[in-house]
Amino acid sequence: MTLLLAGCYNPRGAFYPYVGQAVTYWSTESKPTTITIIDTRTMEPFFTVEIPVGKQLVLDFKDGEGDDDVLTPDLMRYEVFELGKTTGTLRNALTVPDQFSRRIDVTYRPAPEYAQAPTDQQDRVDKDRADWWSSRGGPKPGNAAINMHDGK
């Protein structure tokens, strides 16, 4: 049972919360979020993600698992999931500076920002409405020019 719960990621702490666990940032239509991680030794950003609206970014830092004992001693695993997802595998990784040499900046893009249309709704019938039926306006086909109140 414990092995199954080891893959849980939750903004409120998962099953066994502890300091240093995975962190979740989410992006909504009213708060479209961008995450930037800065190397504080050089003040240069080395990782930036504009989290798409309706998605969440999960970051998990592993101390001492980097490829360089001085410059990048830690490993950051990350993944962008659907908003609200609490389990999953972090399939991306990047070696990063240690916890004392990195800063996470959270910024918000101008709102509102709308989510991409779901791929299963690409063929909606109403997206290609005629001009007279849509907000673009236009003449109606056929007898649209007849004023119904005049009887003509």
Image (cartoon, rainbow, N blue to C red):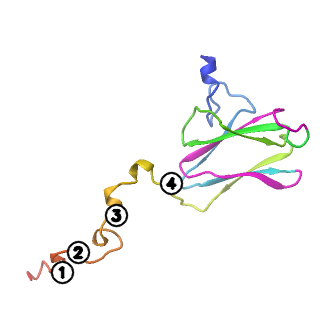
Q: On the picture, is 123 further left or further right than 100? A: left
Q: Quadrant of the N terminus?
A: top right
In the foreground, 41 or 130:
130
Label 1 belongs to which residue? 145
Q: CA gap, disc 3 to disc 1?
A: 23 Å
Q: Which mark is residue 140?
A: 2
Residue drawn 54% across the image and 43% down it: 83
Q: CA gap, disc 4 to disc 2?
A: 32 Å
Q: CA gap, disc 1 to disc 2?
A: 8 Å
- N-terminal of the two: label 3 or label 2? 3
Q: CA gap, disc 3 to disc 4?
A: 19 Å
| Amino acid tagged 1 | Ala
Q: CA gap, disc 3 to disc 2?
A: 15 Å
Q: On the picture, is 123 further left or further right than 20? A: left
- In front of the other: label 3 or label 2? 3
- N-terminal of the two: label 1 or label 2? 2
* Callout 4: SS: loop
- N-terminal of the two: label 3 or label 1? 3
Q: On the picture, is 141 further left or further right than 68? A: left
Label 4 belongs to which residue? 115
In the rendered image, which quarter is residue 129 located in?
Answer: bottom left
- In front of the other: label 3 or label 1? 3
